Amino acid sequence: MNIQTTAPATVATLSMTGISKSFAGVAALTDVSLEVLPGEVHALLGENGAGKSTLMNIATGTLRPDAGAMTVRGEPADDLNPREAARRGIAIVHQHPAVLPDMTVLENLLVALPSTVFPKGVSVEDTASALLARVGLRVHLRDRVEQLSVAQKHLLEIAKALAVDPALLVLDEPTAPLGQESVDLLFALVRRAVADGTSVVYITHRLAEVRELADRVTVLRDGKLRATAVVSEISDHDLLALIVGRQLDSTFPPKHVAGADEQPNLVISGLTGRGFTNVSVQARPGEIVGVSGVVGNGQSDLLRALAGLEPFEGTATVGVSSLSSKELLARAAYLPADRHSEGLMMRLSVRENAAVSALRRFKQRVLMNRKRELAMVGDTLGSLSVKAASMDAAVSSLSGGNQQKVMVARALLSEPILVLADEPTQGVDVGARAEIYGILREVSASGVPVIIASSDAKELEGLCDTVIVMSRGHVVDTLRGDAITEERMIHAAVSSTTRTVSTDDVREQDRPPTARALGFRRFMQGDYAPAVLLVAVMVGLGAYIFSTNDRYLGDFNIQSMLLLVSALGFIALGQTIALLTGGIDLSVGPLAGLLVVVASFFIVEESAATSLVLGFLAMLAVSIAVGLINGSLIRFGRFTAIAATLTTYIAVQGVSFLLRDSPGGYISGDVSRLITTKLGPIPAAFIVLVAVTIGLEFALRKSRWGWNLRAAGSDEESARRVGVNINRTVVLGYVATSVLTFGGAIMLMAQLGIGDPSQGVTYTLSSITAVVLGGTSLLGGRGTFVGTILGALLLVQVLNATVFLGLDQMWQYILQGTLILAAAILYSLARSRRARRTKKA
Amino acid sequence: MADATTPKALDSARFSVSKGLLTVAISTIVLFALSALVAPSSVSQGAVLGMLPFAAVLAIVGLGQMLVVQQGGIDLSVPGAVSLAIVVISHQPNGDDARLLPAVLTSLLFAVIAGALNGFMIGRLGLNAIIATLGTNALFFGAVLAISKGIPRTVTDLLSHVAGRLTFGIPNSVYFALVILVIVTVVVRKTVAGRRFEASGASPAAARATGLRVRTHRGLAYVWAQLLYAIAGMLLAGITLQPTAFQGNEYLLPSVAVVVLGGTSLLGGRGYPGATVVAALFLSQLDQFVLALGVPFAVRTLVQAAALAIGVAIYTVNWKAVRQRFTGRRSQAVPAGS
């Protein structure tokens, strides 16, 4: 069966022999061997699920094989992990780029690449620009990655992979999101890399690309090696024959026999939406429509649009009436491919899941009729032979096949006018597959149109009466009757040369007119825009108050305001770190109080110097301990940040009261005076605060600590993939939060002058307020320390203003509340306008 | 698998007890038993009758917080909302029973407006719940001070009777809490809207895919919550007779604590009303118990923190994996890396 190749004389870049791998007893790879030679492009072909990605995950150390041996450049590599693989010069470009949306292009490069990539003597910007120029990515280094198009993110990912001059570069379907120009560019890049001696493994579904780029090709099917061949020596026909021909174990129900004069009950014409264009198909009653193609070519988008979840143009007619998105949302039943996140409510029971779309049917006057619900849901579940412990069993406890049946039950109970099933048998065992095919056929026979999207061509061949084949959002073939064969579908999908519909091309980005306008826009979208806004508000407010009362800018008022800012400022800096990691620290307020109480035992009148030192050390130790507890509860106890820090909030307050049940222990006047020393009208502490802020800001932008911190908060999964140690980063982040709170506590100590267990708690909310005003996002990954300090200043200024303007306490609250909400709404609107940001879970 | 054996019809239990309810109920029983043994004075008739009204208020506030939390939100405007109800009900009638009912209506109207404000910002504008409710809390306190000028007033006799008296030996506020518990439970579990509300919280993505109005449910949760806070505030005013404008502050953290202790995840999901109410009883009795022991206030706080930590850890930590890890290590049965 294997087509022989000439034996290579050189040492292979990567050699895999006899690789096997199974997942939960299901074989994904069986005895697969692959050899990649220096300087060759080796294409890896096969259907979805043929084992291509699994094989490459083994090659890059993400997965361990169950059996088999590997060598990299002649040296055995049997216990490979991603880090080790990278060290040996293996780089992979995943289908989903591991980029951090909140960080800039430059920072994405810095956080992901080893520092050896950036040679000394050359500016980091120059090196980074060269990396981008190499892949033809024309973006500014300071652009935020979330603003990049999908194609640009891919190029960035490729730039990262090429930056380490890999010996082996694995590209996993790299052209899927790219437009024509980008594809040409990518090919040129691959050729250049190959000319420099890099070996490339190129995973694809497209024969045209294989022909254009690859020297040799390996075909996998059902986890087994079909053949390795020299591309120029094998015909398309032979390649296709190697790809298709999978055995399917399931049996299919007989197909529909259409009457000659039947009118179609489903007419889709000229449907265009995001991800697909000009899709037309029709079906007569009893017919099942299949949507074929390689995963991610618009099939799911089409189904989502038909389910009413996304807008579309064109018409979708069921029966005689053309349906709007809204009607479809209410009356079509949609079975998403991703059962876990979108298909089912995993925390709810089987009954609740099945009933959720049909609740009105069980209503009797006001309340639901339990008997009716149980009877109807039970009947439907029974007719689908759903196997579960009871109707009350959590749907997450069911097998994949039974979960799918619960989704079908939900669809049937809702009495839909159209059923849309995306990958209905994914992760379903063989027996249940046959049952699901039977059910879908029955639904169709009852007159409800059924559309099924599947990447499994064999399945569509067995099940459907009409099949459209999609490639990059276009329908490239429409098959009916006997023409519906796996060969035809795969042929249409892999030999298509259409390009992506979405005009998501790298070069098609509109070029703004002037560099200055561009710079302004970049600044407005950057992290520092809130800071400028705050300064403007503060100057305006200050000018107004000064015009009514000239004592406002007197030394005394400035001093007292800045002293207040110093205490709040340190704590708010700490809170900023917690928020940057994507968390929150509610315990900062009580912690500040506790630290003052601790101080009140050591740093009192007539304390010896050792006692003073001991006091500060004790405060530091307590703060570190609290930070460690917070971080550990969150990372290792899997508490939410709110739950964890709420617990420590209460506990820390308890400890304060344990140490002192009433105020006591006068803080040493000398120490207090030292802390509140002034240089002119400015307290020294405030100068320290500014210095710390600048230092932290610098670290946040320019040090690995800062990149890691923001990476962890921006996108945990991507951060992990680029090598950030999330646990350590976050736990140390909370320690830093507490240590900065220690700084605030020193200021508080001087202000209070006594150990009072009930003080400090208000700093929790005011610190959050200051941080929010400063523009730091509660979603993590984005913010500035400078903004936080300005936020603290504004907050103190507003409270102070009420005194000067003769406003009562009520206005303090109203101004504070208005300020928070105005900032939140403003920043949120600014953000949503610019973002097409992928939603965080 | 498509064989001759017909699968048995699936059944459904009429009543089910959640893990949260079971845990918190057992803890409460143990706590009362411990109270009776160690500090009998904490379960004396006087102590219990003193504790129950406050437990009832906390239970109602907790139910409101639960509705918000189960939609993946959090409501930090509890203090402002409770205080607002307190000042409206104590200031507007100014001791005149005849003006009590209008005051109640005013209070509920304020609650709807407050809830709509929160709900609009969070459900529609997509603001972070923490920021939005932090802001509105300050606004509510602004309104509190505008109405009260910071001066407490005595409530009307009627309110103190309705909220503070006993009926059949049980404080009236307890009946209020129970009726509200029943209403919340029935509405959430037994009406179409309630079931959809629950589904939206359990999985916003899946709810959206089935066509539910997730954002509307999320926003409305804040309205329901505010209504409950208002009722709790009015009861609290009646119980304390001369309430202060900042009395609501004491309910923010406990309201989150009872929700968490009741087993509702702060990430959203299903809400457990019964367990939340029992958790309110638990926390209140814990106070009594520690008070009766004569230990300082500090210990009480620490015990609360411990209860909360254990309460959360029961749900978050994968104890099975922890157990396996330890037994596995001991017997060396599991290979490294498992």
Image (tube, coloured by chain):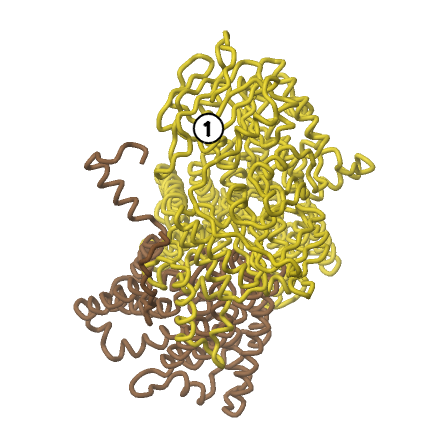
Chain colours: A yellow, B brown
Numbered disc total: 1
| Res. A310 in view | yes
Please state if B312 lies on the left or on the right of B242 as rendered. left
Indicate the amino acid at tag 1. Answer: Leu
Could you say which quadrant of the image residue B92 lies in?
A: bottom right
Image coordinates of residue A521 in percent, x first then y, are: 74, 42
Please state if A817 lies on the left or on the right of B313 as rendered. right
Q: Residue furthest bottom?
A: B98
| Res. A820 in view | no
Image coordinates of residue B16 in percent, x first then y, are: 32, 67
Image: A640 above or below A486: below
Image coordinates of residue B332 in percent, x first then y, are: 21, 34
Image: A504 above or below B65: above
Q: Nearer the viewer, residue A128 or A120?
A: A128
Image: A238 above or below A619: above
Badge 1 density bin: few <14, some 14–19, many ≥20, Cα 10 Å: many
Image: B245 above or below A668: below
Q: Residue at x 66, y 47 (%)?
A: A835
Q: Residue furthest top?
A: A9
Tag 1 subunit: A
Q: Residue furthest front?
A: A260
Q: Nearer the viewer, residue B216 or A782?
A: B216
Per the image, the residue denoted by label 1 is: A55
Q: Residue at x 49, y 32 (%)?
A: A53
Q: Residue at x 43, y 65 (%)?
A: A380
Q: Residue furthest right?
A: A513
Q: Secondary structure at mark 1?
A: helix
Q: Quadrant of the C terminus of chain B?
A: top left
